Amino acid sequence: NSSYMQGSHHPLPQHRLHRRAVECNSNSRTCCRKQFFVDFKEIGWDDWIIQPEGYRMNYCTGPCPTHVAGMPGLASSFHTAILNLIKANDVHAAFSSCCVPTHRRPLSLLYYDQDSNVVKTDIPDMIVEACGCT
């Protein structure tokens, strides 16, 4: 039965790529996610937002070298990866690669509307989870 076992090679699960949140640290030289907390009191929004008092919005920062942009784990799509290969091979290609959010999460908000009603809603794309090079 050993010949049967040789053909059953399982590929690694693909979901690992999507969890790639490269955090910025003091040594970061490429595109990464910077932790950033917004306090609603500090920006004067605490008079209409009930909960939360603030949130970790995060943002993307850092340069996008061509070799990083071409990595499937960091590139936001196959389209991006292919575009970056073209950029790498063509010195005259007038594209510039940017460090942008590749995965975002919604934020649940409890607030007063214009008629002083309490409203709970999920606002999409408020929290940056991961960054990559376009």
Image (cartoon, grey):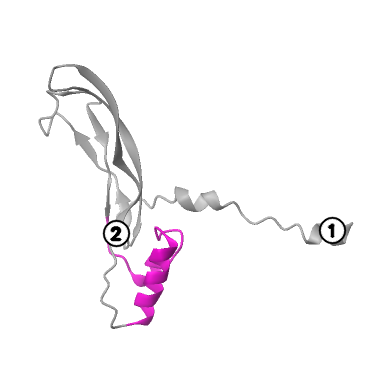
Left or right: residue 34 compared with residue 88 = left
For residue 55, which quarter of the picture?
Answer: top left
Identified by mark 2, the residue type is Cys
> In the rendered view, would you say 113 is above or below 79?
above
> In the rendered view, would you say 1 is above or below 105?
below
Left or right: residue 6 compared with residue 52 = right
Quadrant containing the N terminus is bottom right
The residue lying at 29 percent from left, 27 percent from top is 121
User: Residues in magenta?
Assistant: 61-90
For residue 27, which quarter of the picture?
Answer: bottom left
Q: Earlier in the sequence, mark 1 or mark 2?
A: 1
* Cα–Cα span, label 1 and label 2: 47 Å
**Does 67 appear in magenta?**
yes
Between marks 1 and 2 in the image, the one whose residue lies nearer the viewer: 1
Rendering coords of residue 2 (x, y %): 87, 59
> In the rendered view, would you say 31 is above or below 108?
below
User: Label 1: which residue?
Assistant: 4
User: Label 2: which residue?
Assistant: 99
Quadrant containing the C terminus is bottom left
- For label 2, the SS is strand
**Does 93 appear in magenta?**
no
The residue lying at 13 percent from left, 18 percent from top is 115
The residue lying at 21 percent from left, 23 percent from top is 111
Identified by mark 1, the residue type is Tyr
Depth check: give the residue in front, 17 or 26.
17
Rendering coords of residue 103 (x, y %): 37, 48
